[in-house]
Image (cartoon, rainbow, N blue to C red):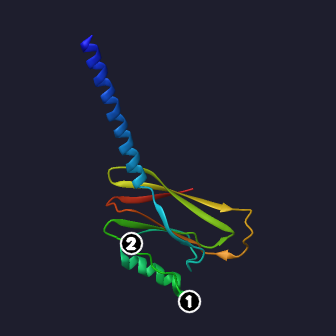
């Protein structure tokens, strides 16, 4: 009877460790989730593009382009590039509302993959032409980053 109770006790303890393993995987995926830092409808960039910004110089260069026709210009966000990197999604010329959604798909030994879902709302009342941009931040990684457009 003692052996049975002892083995039952060990089984219960081992189940909790499996839950912690699953919880750690969930936390890792959540840490890879990009968070929106800044978005605006006018970027002065006419073509659709997705890029990674890994230093302050690249961020400054982008904001020079954005602020060419703005008085006052948009402030440059403060990012710690030793810990974080930015994903820049420029939609190009759009008619109506546009909103991309960047989600983490998978991570391999040397590559991270993200999916960019483009949501255009047909029933919008906005009729002007815009060039929206979206700036997302996420933890820095030395791995290659790739995107799947949908």
Residue that badge 2 annotates: 79
Taking the image as drawn, is residue 107 in sight?
no
**Distance of label 2 from label 1 (alpha carbons):** 23 Å
Q: Looking at the image, which is closer to me, 144 or 135?
A: 135
Residue visible at 65% across and 62% down in the picture: 120
Q: Residue furthest top?
A: 1
Residue at image position (35%, 30%) is 15
Question: For mark 2, does the 10 Å Cα neighbourhood hold few (<14), some (14 to 19), or many (20 or more) residues?
Answer: some
**Residue 132 in the image: above or below residue 6:** below
Helix, strand or loop at label 1? It is loop
Image position, residue 99 (x, y; %): 60, 64
| Quadrant holding the C terminus | bottom right
Q: Secondary structure at mark 2?
A: loop
Q: Nearer the viewer, residue 58 or 29?
A: 29
Q: Is residue 27 above or below residue 4?
A: below
Q: Is residue 7 above or below residue 38?
A: above
Query: x%, y% of residue 86?
Result: 42, 67
At 37% from the left edge and 79% from the top edge, which residue is drawn? 57
Residue 20 position by quadrant: top left
In terms of sequence position, does the residue under pointer 2 or pointer 1 come before the other? 1
**x, y percentage for residue 69?**
57, 87
86, above or below 71, in the image = above
Which labelled disc corresponds to residue 141? none
Closer to the camera, 28 or 115? Answer: 28
Tell me if 45 is positioned left or right of 3 in this view.
right
| Pointer 1 residue | 71
Q: Quadrant of residue 126?
A: bottom right
| Rendered location of residue 142, percent (x, y) | 31, 61
**Label 1: how many Cα within 10 Å (few below 14, some 14–19, many 20+):** few
């Amino acid at each position: 009877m003692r052996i049975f109770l002892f083995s039952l006790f060990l089984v219960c303890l081992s189940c909790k460790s499996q839950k912690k393993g699953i919880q750690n995987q969930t936390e890792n995926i959540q840490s890879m989730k990009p968070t929106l830092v800044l978005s605006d409808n006018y970027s002065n960039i006419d073509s659709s593009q997705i890029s990674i910004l890994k230093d302050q110089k690249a961020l400054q260069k982008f904001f020079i382009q954005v602020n060419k026709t703005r008085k006052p210009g948009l402030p440059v966000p403060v990012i710690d590039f030793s810990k974080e990197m930015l994903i820049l999604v420029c939609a190009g010329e759009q008619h109506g509302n546009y909103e991309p959604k960047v989600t983490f798909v998978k991570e391999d030994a040397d590559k991270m993959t993200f999916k960019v879902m483009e949501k255009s709302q047909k029933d919008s009342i906005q009729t002007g032409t815009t060039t929206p941009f979206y700036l997302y931040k996420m933890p820095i990684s030395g791995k290659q980053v790739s995107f799947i457009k949908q």
